[in-house]
Amino acid sequence: MFVDSVDLIVSSGKGGAGCVSFWTEKFVTKGGPDGGDGGKGGSVYFVVDNNTDTLSALRGRNHMKAENGRQGEGRRCYGRKGESIDIVVPPGTQIVDAQTNEVLFDLVEEGEKVLFLEGGKGGLGNMHFKSSTNQRPTYAQPGLPGVTKAIRLEMKLIADVGLVGYPSVGKSTLIAAVSNARPKVASYEFTTLTPNLGVVMVGEYDSFMMADIPGIIEGASDGRGLGLEFLKHIERTKTLLVMVDVANYREMKYQYETLLVELQRYSEELAGRRFAVAITKCDSFPVDEVNTLTEQFLEDIGLQANTTLNKFKANKAYISYGFEEGFGVDLPVNEPLFVLPISSVSHLNTEALRYTLKNFVNAVEEQEKA
């Protein structure tokens, strides 16, 4: 089960009370106070684990509480410290205050461990209150209470490339063709109900992460369809691949512009991501017809076709936009880096797309570091 949002109440442990005790021993008439301190309450930690990919383990656990500290004892014995709890979450988890919606922590690094709520301090035993004027103190401190907080955990996938497109444009088919992910693929809309994350290998020692989310339709930013619920999963992606279906009943220009508008309405930051375009299902038409449709699409969105570096098959040449030598140094902001016709079923240009996306991701990373 995919769970990407969980409401929790977490509490740190209460500190143990100090002890009121006096030394009693044979032949010792005035042993004095010897009450020990109470133990500290357990704390609440969050731990990021790469082996966890959802929040489903926390589903149904409404209240998670650390152990209270034990009370101090006589003979100056300290109470035992309460056991802390580690809440294991996947990378990309945000801890949000349920009352104010403030993001308290953003956990993205593998192995990261953060202290969320500290346990209450244990009370001092009566041995600390002995003085020349009070040689028989009968007072010990109570332990400090723990802290309780209502929070919401939200998981946002961390990927290098996020796939954006209408339902049934071939997003799941593409991620299955180029990565190790095996999402459900079927010939009806909204087959994908949960995001999928796949590792795309480029050569033997290089790879990047690709995220596939449920299809976006008109009005997704207002809550229509499934897009709004899962658009947050591509907020962390470095780049976007906008997928336009050449065989869809919607015009390619309409698909392209609608997707960009929905991204803009959902998040200004997300709309500012560098992106590229893949024209899918090109095996549905002959090469000449695909090229004609691609030329028309490029003309409609104000780009110029380029065929110099796109003869990926000996007897077929599909036109595209982009692929200039040395690309990635100055990446365009308001237009796609490239527009490439592909077919995930016949693997047309999927290898070219795999390597080009890796170069694209590397170029974006270099620009961010500069």
Image: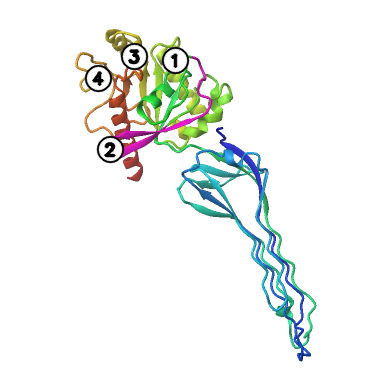
Residue 179, located in which quarter of the rendered image? top left
Contact between labelled residues 4 and 2, with CB atoms less than 8 Å apart: no
Please tell me whether residue 142 is drawn above or below residue 240 in the rendered image: below
Label placed on residue 306: 4
Identify residue type, mark 4.
Asn
Gap in angstroms between the C-alphas marked 3 and 1: 18 Å
- The secondary element bearing badge 4 is classed as loop
Question: Which region of the structure is painted magenta?
Answer: 188-210
Contact between labelled residues 4 and 1, with CB atoms less than 8 Å apart: no
265 lies left or right of 145: left
Label placed on residue 282: 3
Q: Earlier in the sequence, mark 3 or mark 1?
A: 1
Label placed on residue 254: 1
Please name which of the two marks, 2 or 3, marks the residue nearer to the observer.
2
Identify residue type, mark 2.
Glu
User: Mark 1 Cα within 10 Å, few/some/many (few <14, many 20+)?
Assistant: few
Which quadrant is the N terminus positioned in?
top right
308 lies left or right of 265: left
- The secondary element bearing badge 2 is classed as loop
- The secondary element bearing badge 3 is classed as helix
Gap in angstroms between the C-alphas marked 4 and 3: 17 Å
Q: Earlier in the sequence, mark 1 or mark 2?
A: 2
Label placed on residue 204: 2
Identify residue type, mark 3.
Cys
